[in-house]
Image (spheres, grey):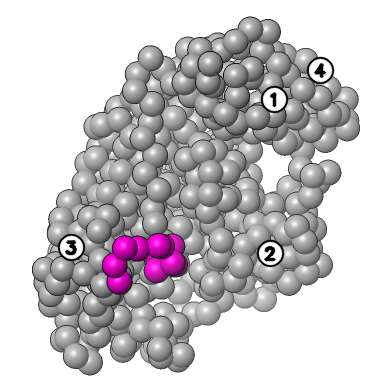
Amino acid sequence: MRVPLRILALVALSSLLGASLARALVIKEYHVPSVTPTIQAAVALADVDGSDLSIIDLDASPITTFGEVLIGNAYKSGHRLLVRPDPTIATLPRVRVVSIDPGSSVFHLNGAGYVTVEDLDIFRDITNAHHLVEIETGTQVLFQRCRIGSIYATPSGTSGWANVWIQFYPVHVMLRNCVMFSRVAGTFDEGIHVDGFQDLGNSVLLYNNDVSDYGREGIHVIDIQHDSYVVMRNNVVANVFATTDPEPLAYHSGVINTAFVYSSGNAAFATAARVQTVDAACLDVAGADVDLLSPGVLGNTADPSTAFQQVQWNAVPPGDANPLFFHLWPSGALHDGLEDVGTTVGAGSPAIVDDAVTDDIDHTVRPGGAAPGHTDRGAHQVDAPGVGVTAASLTGRALRAAPRRNPTADFALDYVAERTGTLTVDVFDASGRRLFHDQRDVVRPSRGSVRAPGRLPSGLAFYRVVLDDAAGRRHVASGRVAVIR
């Protein structure tokens, strides 16, 4: 058996501040542009300040940049960096960082680790000739609640660019509650591009992101190393503008079959043939429960039956915050039934590699709605009780499955199936070798258990439960369990 995955958990700011420490936590703050003139100048100071946590508070908007904000390898578990709007300014919930340099990233993380960027609008306002966010050899990197796009009225004059480009040894690089977009078609070839997995435990996690107006592919993930993993939950991929011929592709997987994919709750506004391409011998990244919707119901400012209230960036008047951008209609096409509910994600749930998704782009709590709540797809959570989608309860979900004990010496799994169909249970070791298989017919509603007849080998075991219901839909529950003897 190969060495099990080493799961590196990103310590959030709240956890860091609340930790029990033998000495006082050293925090240093830099205010840009009121005290320190540029973000890059603040990064240079933070690189060497010797603090546990360096915070760059942006206290004006917009902040215009020429040249990239380069963040290097000065940060580690004992020296973290946070870039955010100044929380003491109530009128500044978001800050625009606007690049007027066509040929460089806005943020370039090169060898950087333990960096969080949050609540920023990372924009290009000139003809685009590069990626907007570029992460190379990143470790414990988080971009959350950011809008990343081009607001320029002319498309790119060159090709090959992505809103977010992630490459080379990514370790726990996460995008959560972000919106990738372009004001006009033809600016970016891809929304999110991920490649360069080289080592055990390389990992990228994509949670509740909206990706729109890509020229070729919305999310493209290439994985060339065994035991690396990709987590994709509740992402929405769409093209706002008229599709070209051929129609751009929503998802493209080059994730080899010795890696791990944890995927659920994703959606695409596309024709059926352009939802996903999976390269030969590669794994599905969009998920068996990917929701396919017509591009015609993506969004309309005057039609509450469509999915989103606003899908095109409004540049008039100048400085408009576009507060409804990619915000769901309360009873629209992506929020009008239980089939629209996404995956509620906690720390280590539904898979041990998951990080919690506890809020949305507006800091609204997830899950929302009437108790016990539900999680909406995309960056925005419709949280008012009784607004269309009922709470995701045990009886409202087609399939739930979990090991009876974890860790365990004898593998037993309990399930609840709310649809009639065929239930398949497979258990694998870390190398992908199947250890156990069971298949049975179930009739709605059904509760039961599956037990391996003998003892499984010690180590990590990965289970996958699939319910193929009578309506032709597939529902998946997966996770892993530590087997001890």
Q: Position of residue 253 (x, y in %)?
A: 41, 34
Residue farthest to the front?
Answer: 22
Q: Nearer the viewer, residue 296 or 433?
A: 433
Task: Tell me if mark 4 has few (under 14), some (14-19) or many (20+) residues whose alpha carbon lies within 10 angstroms of its own.
Answer: few
Q: Amino acid at mark 3?
A: Ile
- Image disc number at residue 441: 4
Residue positioned 24% across, 40% down in the render: 169
For marks 1 and 3, the one nearer the N-term is 3
Q: Which residues are magenta?
A: 14-24
Does label 3 or label 4 sit earlier along the sequence?
A: 3
Q: Amino acid at mark 4?
A: Asp
The picture quadrant where one finds residue 41 is bottom left
In the image, which is nearer the foreground, mark 4 or mark 1?
1
Distance CA(mark 2)–CA(mark 1): 29 Å
The answer to whether 480 is drawn above or below residue 144 in the figure is above
Mark 2 in CB contact with mark 3 (< 8 angstroms): no
Q: Report the residue marked by disc 1.
A: 413
Q: What kind of residue is marked 2? A: Gly
Residue farthest toward the top in the current orientation of the protein: 454
